[in-house]
């Protein structure tokens, strides 16, 4: 099989476009499981990365921006007895802080040039 320059360029372009694959799976009781190339990524980690990058349009609000929700989230990040947001359960963000998890996944994927793959929940024992 002969590999042409066009094929090599196509392969390189594809590799540059997608840095990784994010697998998103909805789990029972409103939870979300997210993996990036097989490694678990917490919703809190993604939110922290987005906030550090200045991307704070992650809420259920017009244009995703809510100064009140952001203030509440950042306050609890500093004062919460459970520690910083990186260790919080995914459902806490949407239940108590008005965070749109789907929006967080899309923004994080875009920030890292990752493709997103939805995976249907299957119970594995």
Image (spheres, rainbow, N blue to C red):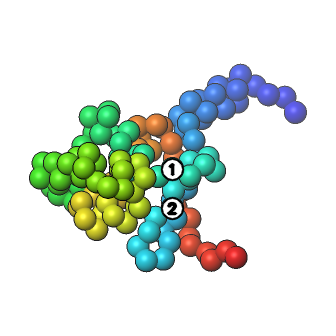
Residue at the disc numbered 1: 41
Q: Is residue 63 visible to the viewer in this orientation of the structure?
A: no
Q: SS for tag 2?
A: strand
Q: From the viewer's perspective, is residue 32 above or below residue 71? A: below
Q: Is residue 20 visible to the viewer in this orientation of the structure?
A: yes
The residue carrying pointer 2 sits among few (fewer than 14), some (14 to 19) or many (20 or more) residues within 10 Å by Cα, namely some
The residue drawn where x is 32% and y is 34% is: 52
Residue at the disc numbered 2: 33
Q: From the viewer's perspective, is residue 37 above or below residue 17? A: below
Give the quadrant of residue 6. Answer: top right
The residue drawn where x is 26% and y is 45% is: 78
Q: Quadrant of the C terminus?
A: bottom right
Q: From the viewer's perspective, is residue 49 above or below residue 84? A: above
Residue 116 horizontal side relative to residue 55, left or right: right
Q: From the viewer's perspective, is residue 52 above or below residue 80? A: above
Pinpoint residue 13: horizontal percent, then vertical percent: 58, 29
- Numbered mark located on residue 66 in the image: none
Residue 45 horizontal side relative to residue 9, left or right: left
- Whichever of callouts 2 and 1 sits on the residue coming sooner in the sequence is 2
> Considering depth in this image, is 80 or 118 the residue closer to the camera?
80
């Amino acid at each position: 099989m002969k590999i042409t320059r066009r094929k090599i360029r196509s392969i390189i372009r594809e590799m540059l476009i997608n840095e990784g694959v994010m697998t998103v799976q909805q789990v029972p009781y409103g939870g979300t499981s997210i993996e990036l190339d097989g490694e678990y990524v917490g919703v809190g980690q993604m939110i922290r990365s987005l906030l550090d990058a200045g991307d704070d349009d992650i809420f259920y609000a017009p244009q995703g921006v809510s100064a009140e929700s952001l203030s509440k989230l950042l306050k609890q990040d500093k004062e919460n007895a459970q520690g910083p947001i990186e260790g919080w359960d995914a459902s806490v963000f949407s239940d108590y802080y008005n965070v749109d998890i789907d929006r967080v996944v899309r923004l994080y994927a875009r920030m890292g040039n990752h493709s997103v793959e939805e995976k249907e929940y299957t119970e594995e024992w």
